[in-house]
Amino acid sequence: MKRTLLAVGALAALACACATLRESRAPVPLAFRDCGEPFECAELRVPIDRERADGPELALAVARARATGPGERIGVLVVNPGGPGLSAVDYLRVARSARHLRGLRERFDLVAFDTRGAGASAPLDCRASLDAWLAQDPTPEGDASWQSAVAAARALAEECARNHGELLPFVGTRDSAADLDALRAALGEQRISYLGFSYGTALGASYAASYPEGVRAMVLDGPIDPSLDLLAFAREQALAVESALAAYDQAAAEQGWHGTAVLESVSARVELAPLPSANASRAARASDVLYGSVEALTAPEYGWHELALALGSAQSGDGSGFVELSDRYFQRRSDGSTGLRVEAQLAVLCADLAGLESPQAYRDAAAGLAREAPHFGVANLLSHLPCAFWPEPARLAEPLQGAAARNVLVIAGRADPLTPYAWGERMAALLRGSTLLRVDTREHTSFGADLPCVDDAVSALLVSGERPAIPPLCP
């Protein structure tokens, strides 16, 4: 369930001047209610605009599972699965019973909150235009397909502005970091521990920089680079996915699977017309092949074999495999809704990223990316195209300044297909004194991947609150 969407944006975060805002409203203790054993749920009410503490509010969904024991309760551990746009509350409900969290749930109250616009926290809904946007050719080449993509991107941005104009300027990671501190206060805690995956590392790093006194211990797994602009981010991430595809292609040659040549053939075919699906609810579109491939590449242990099967079926005229992979990527439900709320993801990315100024700037930049990352570069960049029409954030994000962070563990996979290893190095350098754990893996994120050296380091930091011993390379 941990996921960073292809074309997830760089952090562009958050050394905000929040000290005066923290004191603007006394914390109100949360009124928890039972919402299915062992969970309690509540709503955290926060001002939409923290510079107008007496202005409109929104309610953020919060869930808690109390520490089970044995052993003394340590405190609160806030978890975030990334996205952005995923429901952290839904993640907690699923992940709480996972083996890698077993020891942590004995000593911590596990807590999650849905960030602004996602899950059950004033969820953004722009669905009248969303499907048309997702149905676009992700790699438009001619003028007609380009103009179609621009029109769909504009329509999506304009619908979101009509439906959620009051909230959209206030959904960036900068705002969520302040919400996290409000949650800490409402829980009655002086300090909290934090576990963030993928884009959840953006929220963690923002919080550590802006509210260092609120951090007891923090784990950032699969970190985002907090220094890149949109174009540099899209390029580096696309190159990482290309590297994962090259590794798959080598394994395909050794195993006798369908490889990149077949993927290119299938991609060209679905750009002309959707591919019928025998065992899925709809035909496979070009976007299904793109995102389905990314879904498979993030989990080599089983995903590579699924990609090979999907390619074989598609070559025979059946797109079911790619529809199923794409649906898993977006966490698409039977009613057509998605667990990954794309509108919320775009809202956060458009707020956080230093983006391109016009649709033409995207088109100009795409040519270079097509050469450097031929399978994923253009699509990765153009998935941000609605940002060209998005409302400006109320307060622009500022570059993350160095912050003392001796109680932060950064985990970076050396061949992570979505958050490149170099991003982890940069995150650790910006969070001065943090510990970098290097992991020899092709998976996206490492905690919970059955790697004892990772699990031990995470548990040691979170339980003891002190820097763990780190091997030169894990495992």
Image (spheres, helix red, strand yellow):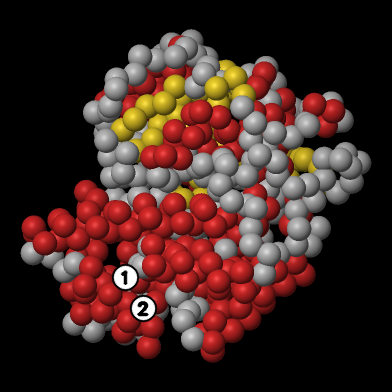
Quarter holding the C terminus is top left
Marks 2 and 1, how far apart in space?
7 Å
Image position, residue 227 (x, y; %): 57, 42
Q: Is residue 177 left or right of residue 103?
A: right
Dividing the picture into quadrants, the one containing residue 239 is bottom left
Q: Which of 458 and 393 is in front in this view?
A: 393
Residue at image point 61% right, 69% down: 361
| Amino acid on which the number 2 mark rests in the picture | Ala
Residue at image point 46% right, 66% down: 368
Image position, residue 191 (x, y; %): 63, 19
- Decide if residue 295 is in sight here: no
Q: Which mark is residue 406?
A: none
Q: How many labels does the image show?
A: 2
- Decide if residue 467 is in sight here: yes
Query: For numbered disc 2, what is the local secondary structure?
Result: loop
Dividing the picture into quadrants, the one containing residue 125 is bottom right
93 shown above or below 472: below
Label 2 close to label 1 by CB (< 8 Å): yes
Q: Residue 322 carries which label?
A: 1
Q: How crowded is mark 1: few (under 14 residues within 10 Å), some or many (20 or more)?
A: many
Tell me which numbered mark, 2 or 1, is placed earlier along the sequence.
2
Q: How crowded is mark 2: few (under 14 residues within 10 Å), some or many (20 or more)?
A: many
Q: Residue furthest right?
A: 54
- Residue corresponding to mark 2: 284
Q: Nearer the viewer, residue 112 or 301?
A: 301
Q: Nearer the viewer, residue 199 or 95?
A: 199
Residue at image point 62% right, 44% down: 12
356 shown above or below 205: below
